[in-house]
Image (spheres, rainbow, N blue to C red):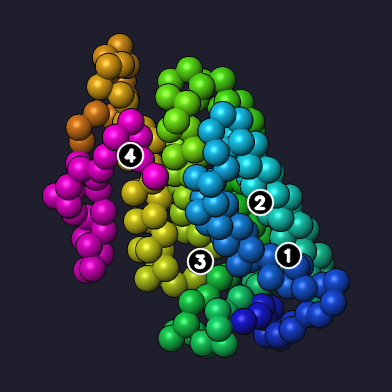
C-alpha cells in the first residue's frame, strides 16, 4: 500500500523517518479503530477516558500533519487541485480500496478530529454523571468507533467503503444517544427509534431493528 499524487500522478514509497508521513491517510482511520478495540481493556474509572483522550489528540495531530503535507505538495507543484491517492494492499482502483485526500477533505478531517478531541476532554464530568462507572469504557469505545466512521467517510474514495463506514458510525451512535430507562427527564434524546442503515442496494432501511442501550451492554 502507498500513496500517489494526482496531477501529475506519482507514487511515494517513503522510507525511514518518512514512513509515518507516507501512511498518514490510513493511520487517521486505523488509530481510532484500534483505540476503540482496546478501550474496553483500559479498566474502569479514568482509564478509558484517558486512553480515548490520548487517541483523539493523536488523531488530531495526524490530521494537522496531513493537511500541511497536502498543502506543501500543492505549493511545490504550483497547483491547487493536488490529490493524494492512497491504495490499500497494492489493489488498484476500482478493485481495491482507495483513500483520496485534497485540501478540502483534509481540512474536513482536521475539523472532525479537532472537535472530537476537545469534546473528549470535556466529556469526563458529564459521562461520569450520566453513565454508570462500570459502563464508561463501553461509551468511550463506541465514541472512538463513531469518530472512525466520520473520518473514514471524509477520506475514502470509493462508494463501498462509504457504505461500511456509515454503518460503523450508525451502529456506534445509536447506543451513545440512547437514554437510560430511569432517566425520563431527557425527552429531547432519541429513545426507541429504529436504527437506520443503508442496505446492499444503497437504499435507506429503517426496519433493521433496535440497538441496545449502553446500560444494557456488557463486555
Residues at marks 2 and 1 touching, judged by CB atoms closer than 8 Å = no
- Identified at 37% across, 71% down, the residue is 160
Tell me the CA gap for discs 4 and 1. 41 Å
Residue 76, given in percent of the width and then of the height, sits at 84, 72
Residue 13's place in the image compared with 27, above or below, is: below
Q: Which badge, 1 or 3, comes first in the chain's sequence?
A: 1
Is residue 120 at all visible to an observer of this figure?
no
Tell me the CA gap for discs 1 and 3. 16 Å
Q: Which badge, 4 or 1, comes first in the chain's sequence?
A: 1
For label 1, the residue is: 70
Q: Which badge, 2 or 1, comes first in the chain's sequence?
A: 2
For label 3, the residue is: 156
**Which segment did they paint magenta?**
194-219
User: Which of the two discs, 2 and 3, sits closer to the camera?
Assistant: 2
Residues at marks 4 and 3 touching, judged by CB atoms closer than 8 Å = no
Residues at marks 2 and 3 touching, judged by CB atoms closer than 8 Å = no
User: Which of the two discs, 1 and 3, sits closer to the camera?
Assistant: 3
Along the line of sight, the residue nearer the viewer: 25 or 15? 15
Residues at marks 4 and 2 touching, judged by CB atoms closer than 8 Å = no
Q: Which badge, 2 or 3, comes first in the chain's sequence?
A: 2
User: Which of the two discs, 4 and 2, sits closer to the camera?
Assistant: 4
For label 1, the crowd category at 10 Å Cα-Cα, with few meaning under 14, some 14 to 19 and many 20 or more, is: many
For label 2, the residue is: 59
Q: Which badge, 4 or 2, comes first in the chain's sequence?
A: 2
Amino acid at each position: 500500500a502507498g500513496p500517489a499524487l494526482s496531477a501529475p500522478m506519482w507514487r511515494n514509497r517513503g522510507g525511514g523517518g518518512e514512513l509515518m508521513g507516507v501512511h498518514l491517510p490510513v493511520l487517521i482511520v486505523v488509530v481510532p479503530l484500534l483505540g476503540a478495540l482496546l478501550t474496553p481493556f483500559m479498566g474502569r474509572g479514568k482509564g478509558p477516558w484517558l486512553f480515548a483522550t490520548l487517541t483523539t489528540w493523536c488523531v488530531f495531530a495526524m490530521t494537522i500533519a496531513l493537511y500541511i503535507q497536502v498543502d506543501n505538495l500543492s505549493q511545490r507543484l504550483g497547483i491547487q487541485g493536488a490529490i493524494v491517492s492512497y491504495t490499500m494492499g497494492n489493489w488498484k482502483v476500482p478493485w481495491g480500496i482507495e483513500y483520496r485526500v485534497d485540501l478540502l477533505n483534509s481540512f474536513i478531517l482536521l475539523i472532525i478530529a479537532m472537535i472530537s478531541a476537545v469534546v473528549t476532554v470535556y466529556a469526563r464530568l458529564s459521562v461520569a454523571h450520566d453513565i454508570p462507572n462500570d459502563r464508561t469504557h463501553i461509551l468511550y469505545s463506541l465514541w472512538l468507533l463513531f469518530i472512525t466512521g466520520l473520518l473514514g467517510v471524509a477520506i475514502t474514495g470509493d462508494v463501498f467503503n462509504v457504505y461500511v463506514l456509515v454503518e460503523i458510525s450508525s451502529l456506534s451512535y445509536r447506543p451513545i444517544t440512547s437514554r437510560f430507562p430511569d432517566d425520563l427527564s431527557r425527552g429531547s434524546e432519541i429513545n426507541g427509534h429504529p436504527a437506520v442503515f443503508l442496505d446492499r442496494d444503497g437504499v435507506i432501511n429503517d426496519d433493521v431493528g433496535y440497538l441496545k442501550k449502553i446500560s444494557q451492554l456488557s463486555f
